[in-house]
Image (cartoon, helix red, strand yellow):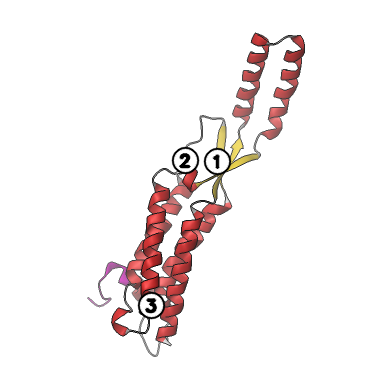
Amino acid sequence: MVEDRLRLGSLISAIGAALLAVSVFLPWYGVSLTAGGAASAQQALNNVAQQYGNTTFQTQAKAIGLGFGAFTGHQVTTLSAHQTLKYLNVILLILAAIAFLAALLRLAGASEPTRTGGGSQIAFVGLLATVCVLFRMVERPAPLGEVFSLSLSWGIWFALASSVAVVIGSLWPALTSSPNRSASTPATALDGLSGWPPDA
C-alpha cells in the first residue's frame, strides 16, 4: 500500500511538472484595448488623414476612427508567459524540469525503501513554482502605456493547478496514509519541507 501511494504521488508530480512546462507557452494574459487607447488611435488616424489625405480620405478616416470605440474592453489577443516574462518563464521551465526528473527517479525507486525519499524536495520545488505563478497573477506585466490592459487568461490558471499538483503529488503518501499505521498528517507532511523531523 505504501508503495502504491508512493507511485501514485510520484506520477501526479511528474504529470504536474510536465503540464507546468507546457503552460509556459499557453495564454497567460488577455490583451484588451482601453478607452484611452481607442481615443489615441482615433486621434492618430485623424491627424494622419488631415495632414496627408484629401477630404474624402478624411471623412473615411473619421468613420473608421469612430469604430475603434467598439473594441474598447474586448480582448484583441493573448500573450503567453514565454512572450511576456523574460526571466520567469525560464525559471518555471527549470523548476518543472527538476520536479519532473525528481518525480521520475522517485517513481523508479518506489519499490526500494532506501530510495523512497525526496518528497519534501519535490514539494519545495512545486511550492516555488506556485509562488512564482501567484506573483505574476497579482503583479501583471505593465502594458504599453495606457493603450492596453491585461487580464488573466486560462493558461495562468492551468499553470497554477499544475504547480499545485506537483506539491500534492509529492506529499500524497503522507496525506493518504492510514492513521493506524502512521502518525503522518498534513501538518507533519508540511514539516518535512524544512528537512527536519516533526519532533526535532
Q: How many angstroms separate mark 2 from mark 3 (CA)?
A: 40 Å
- Left or right of residue 153, residue 95 in this image: left
Residue at image x 47%, y 46%? 82
Choose mark 3 or mark 1, whichever is in front: 3
Distance in Å between CA atoms under marks 3 and 1: 43 Å
What residue is drawn where x is 45% and y is 53%? 134
At which x and y percent is residue 20?
47, 59
Which quadrant of the structure image shows residue 43? top right
Q: Is residue 125 left or right of residue 31?
A: left
Which quadrant would the N terminus be assigned to in this image? bottom left
Which residue position holds label 2?
141
Tell me the crowding category of disc 3: few under 14, some 14 to 19, or many 20 or more residues within 10 angstroms, Cα based.
Answer: some
Relative placement, left or right, of 185 versus 18 is: left
**Residue appearing at x 38%, y 64% in the figure:** 99
x and y percent of residue 13 in the render? Answer: 44, 69
Magenta segment: does it hold 193? yes
Nearest to N terminus: mark 2 or mark 3: 3
**How many labels were placed on the picture?**
3
Residue bearing the label numbered 1:
150
Task: Give the quarter of the figure containing the C terminus.
Answer: bottom left
Quick check: 144 above or below 129?
Answer: above
Q: Are marks 1 and 2 in contact (CB under 8 Å)?
A: yes
The residue to which callout 3 is attached is 108
> Where does residue 30 sit, x and y in percent of width and height?
58, 44
Q: Position of residue 136 (x, y in %)?
A: 45, 48
Residue stretch rendered in magenta on the structure: 192-200
Circle 2 Cα neighbour tier, 10 Å, few/some/many (<14 / 14–19 / ≥20): few
Judge whether residue 199 is colored magenta. yes
Secondary structure mostly seen in magenta is: loop
Q: Secondary structure at mark 1?
A: strand
